[in-house]
Structure formats: C-alpha cells, structure tokens
Image (cartoon, grey):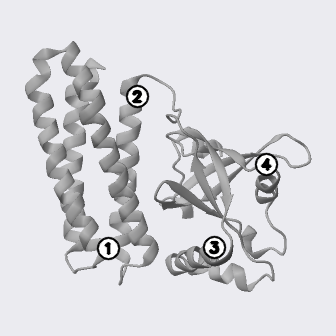
Amino acid sequence: MKEFRANDGQVGGPFEDARLLLLTTTGARSGRPHTTILGYYPDGDRTLVVGSAGGSPKHPDWYHNLLARPVATVETGLFTYPAKAVVLRGPERDDVFGRLVEANAGWGDYQTRTTRVIPVVALVPEPGLPGGGGSLADMLVRIHLSFRRELALIRKEVAASGTLGAQLRVNCLTMCQGLHYHHTGESTGLFPGIVAQHPELSELIAALNAEHEQIAVLLKELEQLVSTPAPDLLTKVDRLIALLTAHLDREEAELLPHL
C-alpha cells in the first residue's frame, strides 16, 4: 500500500500493469477502517471488484464488511472518492463473472477451488467530485494522467488479444464515455470560465474545442469498431492515443499557467 500511495497508484513487479485500487471498508465487528488492495475492472459508471480470496473457502473480510455496511472509500492513486457497494446477484453476477473469467482465466481457477460462489461487487461513486488534493490545475493534470494510463492499458490489451473479448469491449466503451464526459465538461464549464477571465485566450480555446470535436468523431468510430470488431481497431486506438496525447499536452502547456 505504501508503494501504491507513494507512486499515485502504480506498483512494480507482477502487478506493474494491473488496474489496482485501495478499498477501505468499516470492520463489521470492530467498526475500525480496513484497507485492502484489489484488482478492478471498469464497468461504465461503476467499478467491479471480485471477492476471490485466492479460492479460499471463506469470503474475504472486506466483503463481509460491505455486507454489514455497503459503503466504502476508494483510492485509485490519483483520486479518492466515497462509493456505494452493490453485490451482484443471480444472472447479473453470473454474466459479469463470465466475462471476467474470459478476460482473466485465473478467476475461473479460483472458483474451481471453492464451493462458495465467488462474489462480484460493483462500486458506485457517490455524487460529487472525487478528491485528490491540490488546485484546479492539479485536478486537471490528474484527470489527464488517468486517461493516459487507461489508454496505455487498453492499447496493450488490444495488441495482445486475438479476439475482442466482452470485458475489453467494456473497457474501451467506458474509456470513450469518460473522455466524452470530460471534454463536454471542459467545453461547457471550464473553457467559458477561462475566456471570461482571459479574453486573450479566445483563439486558443476555440482551437481546443475544435480538437474536442475531432476526438469526438474518433471516439464514435472507436465505439463502432468495438461493437463490430474490425482488424484496424489497434490502428484506430493508436490514432486516438496520438491525437489525445497531443491535445492533453497542449492543454497543459497553455492552460495550466492560467489555472
């Protein structure tokens, strides 16, 4: 956990490229905070975690804690936010677990080692902005870094996959949704505020908005490719990464001094 927090959510070794988070629950018996590091999967507006406990016959403590009090604090390394925990049950749990097994056969191996049904929990962020500390400029840099990291992971997953599995499609669509939401927020909220205070930046903001439109077109194309996989998916991902990286670099270089 020290390495995770010291390096903004990144660790070395076998988990270097893993999606990891810190989950803090309240002890069902002790009432004290209990923090554990878990792998996670994007799932639209929520995040999925799995109570595998390495195939142990008993559910992990964090899961028992969430059953008693279904709220938690999530740390991604870049952001911290409160979340509601929803245990997936019945067909929904089975369908989701099936796609996670497709993405990582290890989950299926853990299930074969135990008679209990390995739980899947959705962490749904509570309304409000996530915390990360620092100024508006710091927040923008953290948001940009989160997109850079996720795109790098998706690029690696697409390059390594022989076929586009269900979870990888969800990863791509979640990232597209997040970018669309972020750019809409910038264009309708952040940018008008900057122009109001710095009219001299009007041309720059217009250019950044035009880049948002270019990226939106590419995101739509990517979403269509994900829904109907095509051989040029990796090419499209690389094009998005190049365009988005140049856009984020330009935003940071031009706007951070004014935030």
Spot occupied by residue 246 in the image (x, y as percentages of width and height) = 18, 45
Classify 10 Å Cα crowding around label 4: few (below 14), some (14-19), many (20 and above). Answer: some
Tell me the mark number nearer the camera, choosing from 1 and 4: 4
Residue type at mark 3 is Arg
Find disc 1 in the rendering and name its residue.
Answer: 159
Earlier in the chain: of badge 1 and badge 4, it is: 4
Find disc 4 in the rendering and name its residue.
Answer: 69
Dots 3, 2 in contact, CB < 8 A:
no
Q: Is residue 23 above or below residue 203?
A: below
Q: Nearer the viewer, residue 208 or 4?
A: 208
Tell me the mark number nearer the camera, choosing from 3 and 2: 3
Find disc 3 in the rendering and name its residue.
Answer: 93
Residue type at mark 1 is Ala
The residues bearing labels 2 and 4 have C-alpha atoms spaced at a distance of: 33 Å
Residue appearing at x 15%, y 47% in the figure: 213
Residue appearing at x 36%, y 64% in the figure: 172
Find disc 2 in the rendering and name its residue.
Answer: 138
Numbered tag placed on residue 191 in the rendering = none
The residues bearing labels 4 and 3 have C-alpha atoms spaced at a distance of: 20 Å
Where residue 60 sits, quadrant-wise, is: bottom right
